[in-house]
């Protein structure tokens, strides 16, 4: 399997939110690598290493949540309110994580958000393929 970057950059005008079934598994693979790196940083009490990897993890999570909703990433974080498939209290939880990326608790919270979004993605994929999925912009 190609790496995330090769697959993403190898196509012209890639819109991963249009093909989340293809791109989200690559994103989750990247998260697994980052998760290990963050965990190692915390195990040796290296909050600087953990913080850098957490920033990458936050970026992956934002892609994950938007692409799960078949939309491009849109900031500010208040735009998350318009999405249907997302974890409970995602805005507040992300603000906490982003404000304190070096904390072990932020790492645990980001891991939980990724797990919860994985469930949301599976649910939204099923409903999308069954023809019952509404996009975030539909009433």
Image: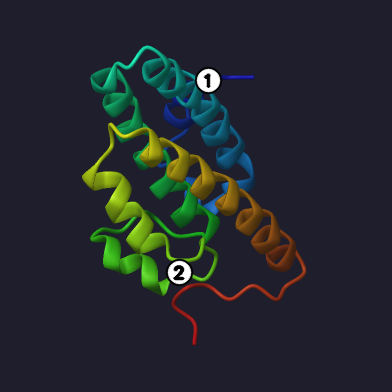
Q: Which residue is mark 1?
A: 3
Q: Which residue is mark 2?
A: 83
Task: Name which quarter of the figure residue 56 lies in.
Answer: top left
Q: Which residue is at 42% across, 16% downward?
A: 43
Q: Callout 2: helix, strand or loop? A: loop
Looking at the image, is 49 positioned above or below residue 128? above
Q: Which residue is at 69% across, 61% downward?
A: 123
Residue 128 is situated, as x and y percent measured from the top left of the image, at 68, 66
Looking at the image, is 129 positioned above or below residue 32? below
16 on left or right of 1? left
For this orientation, the residue located farthest to the right is 130
Q: Residues within 10 Å of mark 2 (few under 14, many from 20)?
A: some
Q: Quadrant of the N terminus?
A: top right
Q: Callout 1: helix, strand or loop? A: loop
For this orientation, the residue located farthest to the bottom is 139
135 on left or right of 121? left
The reply to whether residue 15 is visible in this rendering is no
User: Foreground: 37 or 120?
Assistant: 37
Task: Name which quarter of the figure residue 40 lies in.
Answer: top left
Q: Which residue is at 44% across, 45% downward?
A: 109
Mark 1 vs mark 2: in front: 2
User: Foreground: 22 or 97?
Assistant: 97
Instruction: First in sequence, mark 1 or 2: give its number.
Output: 1
Q: Residues within 10 Å of mark 1 (few under 14, many from 20)?
A: few
Residue 37 is situated, as x and y percent measured from the top left of the image, at 43, 18
Residue 51 is situated, as x and y percent measured from the top left of the image, at 28, 28
How many numbered marks are there? 2
Measured in 3D between alpha carbons, the distance from the residue under mark 1 to the one under mark 2, in whole angstroms, is 28 Å
The reply to whether residue 131 is visible in this rendering is yes
87 on left or right of 57? right
Task: Name which quarter of the figure residue 14 lies in.
Answer: top left
Q: How is the image coloured?
A: rainbow
């Amino acid at each position: 399997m190609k790496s995330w970057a090769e697959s993403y950059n190898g196509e012209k005008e890639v819109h991963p939110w249009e093909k989340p079934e293809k791109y989200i598994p690559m994103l989750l693979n990247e998260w697994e690598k980052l998760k290990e790196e963050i965990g190692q940083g915390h195990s040796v009490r290296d909050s600087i290493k953990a913080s850098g990897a957490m920033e990458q993890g936050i970026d992956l999570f934002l892609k994950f949540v938007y692409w799960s909703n078949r939309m491009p990433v849109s900031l500010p974080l208040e735009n998350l309110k318009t999405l249907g498939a997302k974890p409970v209290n995602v805005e507040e939880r992300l603000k906490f994580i982003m404000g304190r990326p070096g904390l072990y608790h932020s790492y645990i919270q980001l891991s939980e958000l990724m797990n919860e979004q994985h469930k949301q993605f599976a649910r939204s994929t099923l409903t999308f393929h069954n023809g019952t999925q509404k996009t975030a912009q539909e009433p």
